[in-house]
């Protein structure tokens, strides 16, 4: 078949109405969502909840409990003033409080932004390229990405960062499109999605400002040259002064006080360690090396087949490198790889920056992207299914421990604590979803943690004796506790406070048979032998009878 005949054949796809492409993309997105949901359900059969998503589940459950005794207005007011981290993720659910008690209710706010990203990106690529099949093929390539259906980082996991990342990418996209074409609708959409991104995840404002910095400079240059319409200038001034700036000031204070000053948040851990974390999460968790390599090849081919624009290339490269630069070089973060989810969708804005030549190479690119994407979607499902069914030793241990504790939790507000790891939220959330049992509001000062900075922040001291005594003075108020063997404890923690607290509590429990009676023991590869002790002086004491 000659090149001209091939072009003629593929021109048929350009005659298909745009809404048909939207329908097909929506159906494919629904199919991907179903795959992700199926893999997520499969994951939870042999795996536990994990931090940080379990904390967000815990928060929704506590909010559900709050709605039972407060009006809608009181609940919204409470959320507005107390949830600076992710108000957008909870606000729609407040109108239907029962939804807060459902395990996957967070998808009500997460999935719409995922679908909006798909729809707007498809249409924007078509706007620039004027080629429907290419825009369609590229979206399918995006949907075949490993992280989309991952049961640890994907669209069906309760992360704030990924949802905020979709909103941030949309804001970045419309900011660039407005700079390029100055459509009022693009400016409005930039304002809307900027607000949504910050309300989805407080600290995302850092990425929003950093990624869009070059475009902001170009816009300022336009303003200086008086090349911007007065209407747009007024919108920019009002939005920046009365909405964006106050949100940024609020979140800047919270980020510094809540993460850096108080918790450290895994910062200043060294550039090489930070780079290793980034490399691992990008090449093994969010993507595979194969998928990254394919994306790079496709982008090179697109650039070769485009009307080359050096400035646009620099802007795009900057937009995908600035976040790793901030996290690796400036913050040197190693403890929060999930924050990279906040910029991952920006990687897929590449086709907006370069107008491709409509030739046989463009058609070949579409064919290759569609073929590869179908293969990768199947490969993702197959490999994740295998990992779901073959949990690691650590996952098996965690599941075993959670099952033991959930079985022990028999009534609302059962008070307990584990001193072998930071483990309080997982069994409590599991017990609620499986048995409908509520628990008392979380007291961070009483919660045992593996993070030294959490102890020093909540107790306002780093004195191990003072902190240990606090737990010793309160331990007898618990219904049951889980402890490790004394000789194993020094190997479980990498900080002296967790070590000291765990050791002190374990000694007291094991030396107080008139209060604490051994109930259950289990052997684990990760923690050694764990023992569950029941407080027999507590009127709610029950026994597993499983020694």
Image (cartoon, helix red, strand yellow):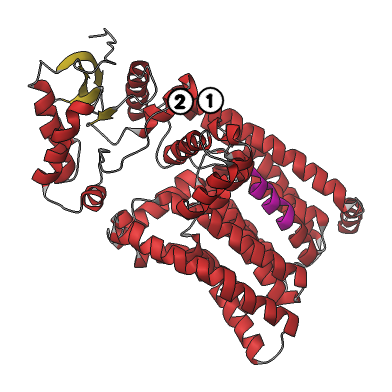
Residue 145 seen: yes
- Residue shown at 23%/25% (left/top)? 481
Task: Answer above or below: position of 506 versus 58.
Answer: above
Q: Which residue is mark 1?
A: 42
Q: Residue at x 45, y 45 (%)?
A: 284
Magenta-drawn segment: 111-121
Query: Are the residues at dot 1 and dot 2 in contact (C-beta closer than 8 Å)?
Result: no
View extreme (bottom): residue = 225
Question: Can you give x and y, in whole percent of width and height, for residue 455 in the image?
Answer: 22, 47
Residue 199 drawn at (x, y percent)? 55, 56
Is 417 magenta? The answer is no
Helix, strand or loop at label 1? It is helix
Q: Which mark is residue 432?
A: 2
Which of labels 1 and 2 is toward the front?
2
Q: Main secondary structure of the magenta part?
A: helix
Q: Is residue 423 above or below residue 142?
A: above
């Amino acid at each position: 078949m000659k090149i001209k005949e091939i072009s003629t054949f593929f021109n048929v796809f350009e005659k298909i109405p745009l809404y048909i492409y939207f329908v097909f993309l929506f159906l494919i997105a629904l199919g991907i969502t179903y795959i992700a949901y199926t893999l997520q359900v499969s994951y939870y059969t042999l795996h536990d909840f994990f931090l940080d998503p379990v904390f967000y589940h815990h928060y929704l459950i506590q909010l559900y409990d709050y709605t039972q005794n407060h009006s809608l207005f009181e609940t919204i007011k409470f959320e507005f003033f107390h949830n600076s981290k992710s108000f957008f993720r909870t606000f729609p659910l407040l109108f239907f409080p029962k939804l807060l008690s459902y395990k996957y209710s967070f998808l009500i706010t997460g999935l719409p932004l995922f679908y909006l990203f798909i729809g707007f990106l498809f249409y924007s690529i078509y706007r620039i390229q004027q080629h429907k099949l290419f825009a369609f093929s590229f979206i399918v390539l995006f949907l075949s990405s490993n992280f989309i259906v991952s049961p640890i980082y994907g669209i069906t996991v309760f992360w704030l960062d990924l949802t905020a990342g979709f909103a941030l990418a949309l804001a970045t996209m419309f900011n660039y499109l407005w700079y390029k074409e100055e459509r009022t609708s693009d400016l409005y959409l930039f304002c809307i999605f900027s607000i949504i991104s910050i309300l989805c995840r407080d600290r995302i404002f850092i990425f929003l400002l950093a990624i869009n910095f070059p475009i902001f400079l170009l816009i300022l240059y336009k303003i200086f040259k008086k090349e911007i319409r007065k209407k747009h200038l007024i919108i920019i001034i009002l939005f920046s002064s009365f909405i964006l700036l106050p949100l940024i000031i609020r979140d800047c204070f919270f980020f510094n006080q809540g993460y850096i000053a108080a918790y450290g948040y895994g910062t200043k851990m060294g550039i090489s360690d930070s780079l290793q974390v980034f490399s691992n999460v990008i090449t093994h968790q969010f993507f595979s090396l194969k998928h990254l390599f394919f994306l790079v090849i496709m982008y090179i081919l697109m650039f070769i087949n485009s009307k080359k624009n050096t400035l646009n290339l620099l802007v795009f490269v900057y937009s995908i490198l600035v976040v790793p630069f901030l996290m690796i070089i400036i913050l040197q973060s190693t403890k929060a790889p999930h924050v990279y989810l906040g910029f991952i969708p920006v990687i897929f804005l590449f086709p907006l920056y370069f107008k491709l030549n409509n030739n046989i190479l463009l058609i070949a690119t579409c064919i290759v992207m569609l073929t590869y994407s179908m293969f990768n979607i199947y490969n993702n499902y197959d490999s994740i299914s295998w990992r779901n069914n073959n949990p690691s030793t650590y996952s098996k241990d965690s599941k075993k421990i959670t099952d033991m504790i959930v079985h022990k939790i028999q009534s609302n507000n059962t008070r307990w604590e584990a001193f072998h790891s930071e483990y309080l939220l997982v069994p409590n959330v599991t017990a609620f979803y499986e048995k409908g049992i509520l628990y008392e509001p979380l007291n961070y000062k009483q919660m045992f943690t593996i993070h030294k900075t959490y102890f020093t922040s909540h107790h306002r001291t780093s004195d191990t004796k003072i902190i240990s005594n606090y737990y010793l003075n309160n331990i007898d108020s618990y219904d049951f506790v889980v402890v490790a063997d004394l000789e194993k404890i020094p190997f479980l923690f990498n900080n002296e406070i967790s070590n000291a607290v765990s050791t002190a509590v374990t000694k007291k429990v094991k030396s107080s048979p008139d209060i604490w009676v051994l109930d259950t023991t289990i052997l684990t590869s990760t923690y050694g032998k764990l023992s569950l002790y029941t407080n027999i002086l507590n009127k709610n004491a029950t026994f597993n009878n499983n020694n």
